Amino acid sequence: MVQMKLSFDNINSDESLYVRDADGVYQVATAAQVLAGARKAADSLALPGQQFSSPQAVKDFLVAKLAGIEHEVRVTEDLTCPDTGAMREMDELLERWRTEGKPALVHCYMGVGRCRTVVSAHLAARIGDVRRAFLWTGRPETERQKEFVREYAEKRAQA
């Protein structure tokens, strides 16, 4: 892996960002290198052990961290389920990304309840089998989340 250092030259009129390679040679940074540097800088927005104080703080961090990567940031309170409209939007987005061959990452703080609810609901709606969806993704954390998956899959099957 090449270690890079970004620098900004405000003397020249082109206002480019530069990357210094391992040999100390500077080159104009590519868009991918600028975004990689921005993601690294976004890490400073969340110090180790720091708790996010609000859903907006989480969203601000993730928007900065994921700059340049197609993404969606959704906020659902811990141990709850998304509302049906939000789930439908996430379901459609995940399906679009799947058909376009794009990777998808669904994550919540612990990776147990909310993300499993979303992925299980999406999968169960597509394959028509909640039990199999739970086998593939793991069961969500709460009984309400499990029931949400069942209800969502049933609604999608009737649509």
Image (cartoon, rainbow, N blue to C red):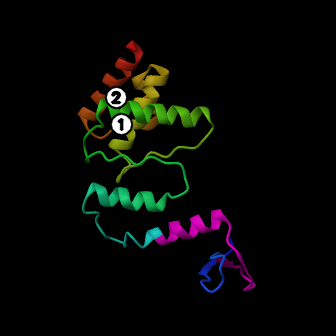
Residue 107 point in image, percent of width and height? 41, 48
Residue 69 point in image, percent of width and height? 55, 53
Does residue 110 appear to the left or right of 102 in the view shown? left
Nearer to us in this view, 105 or 75? 75
Does residue 45 appear to the left or right of 127 in the view shown? left
Q: Magenta segment: does it hold 35? A: yes
Residue 107 vs 58, above or below: the answer is: above
Residue 124 point in image, percent of width and height? 43, 25
Report the residue marked by disc 2: 149
User: Which residue is rendered at x = 63% and y = 86% of the image?
Assistant: 11
Residue 39 vs 158, above or below: the answer is: below
Q: Secondary structure at mark 2?
A: helix
Answer with the quarter of the image where residue 133 lies. top left
Segment tinted magenta in the rendering: 17-41
Q: Magenta segment: does it hold 85? A: no
Q: Amino acid at mark 2?
A: Val
Q: Are marks 1 and 2 in contact (CB under 8 Å)?
A: yes
Answer with the quarter of the image where residue 137 lies. top left
Q: Earlier in the sequence, mark 1 or mark 2?
A: 1
Report the residue marked by disc 1: 117
Q: Amino acid at mark 1?
A: Thr
- Residue 134: tell me if it is visible: no
How many angstroms separate mark 1 from mark 2 (CA)? 6 Å
